[in-house]
Image (cartoon, rainbow, N blue to C red):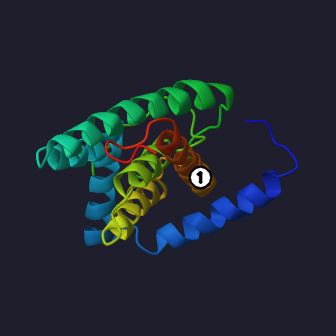
Amino acid sequence: MRAGPLAPALRRFDAAGERVADRLRGRPVADRVMYAASELGDFSLCWHLLGAARGLTSDRAAAEAVRLSAVLGIESLLVNVGVKGLVRRTRPVVLEERPHRLRRPRTSSFPSGHASSAFCAATLLAEGRARTWPLYYAAAAVVAGSRVHVRIHHASDVVAGALLGLALGRAARRVWPAPGREE
């Protein structure tokens, strides 16, 4: 990615994100949680599994699970093929050995696809769930934040991905209302 007028501010933001992540790195429980969250976020696995598990509870929930998986497929194409193809940002440099194995993506670092899919999924999963909606966004934040912890993304990649995911989730709710919620 070419340096633009925002480059110094992005470098400072990313450095601050690294300092925050460094406070937890190397702690066995934090590393295990963050590496597991990052791994479960691959290919939106955790969100598809969550949708499928909820889909077993009723016909309406099954239709919502299909909607969730379809929207995540579209989101993945838009982000991983579209946006990442336009913005070719390098990933953070990792000099030391990681404490756990992790798939290393070959695509651009910007934006974080894990963050985008997490917040898109949370937006759809939280819809109409007054008591549990914070849990979906908390899980999305953990998956998204894990990408900085494991040094696969810069903090600004994660923030951009989260904002993009929120926008795509809201657009999906308007274009394809949840079953039983059509206006």
Residue 78, image quadrant? top right
112, 128: nearer the viewer: 128
Task: Please tell me how crowded label 1 is: few (under 14), some (14-19), or many (20+) other residues with Cα within 10 Å.
Answer: some
Q: Position of residue 123 (x, y in %)?
A: 44, 53
Residue matched to label 1: 163
Most extreme residue toward the front, as rendered?
Answer: 183
Q: Position of residue 164 (x, y in %)?
A: 58, 46
Residue 99 makes an appearance in the image: no
Assign the N terminus to one quadrant of the image.
top right
| Residue at 67% from the left image edge and 27% from the top image edge | 86
Q: Position of residue 126 (x, y in %)?
A: 37, 58
Q: Is residue 127 above or below residue 93?
A: below
Residue 182, image quadrant? top left
Q: Is residue 160 above or below residue 83?
A: below
| Residue at 31% from the left image edge and 69% from the top image edge | 30
How many marks can you see? 1
Residue 113 makes an appearance in the image: yes
- Tag 1: residue type? Leu
Q: Secondary structure at mark 1?
A: helix
Most extreme residue toward the right, as rendered?
Answer: 5
117, 176: nearer the viewer: 176
Q: Position of residue 47 (x, y in %)?
A: 30, 46
Residue 70, image quadrant? top left
Residue 124 lies left or right of residue 21; in this view the side is: left
Q: Is residue 120 above or below residue 72?
A: below
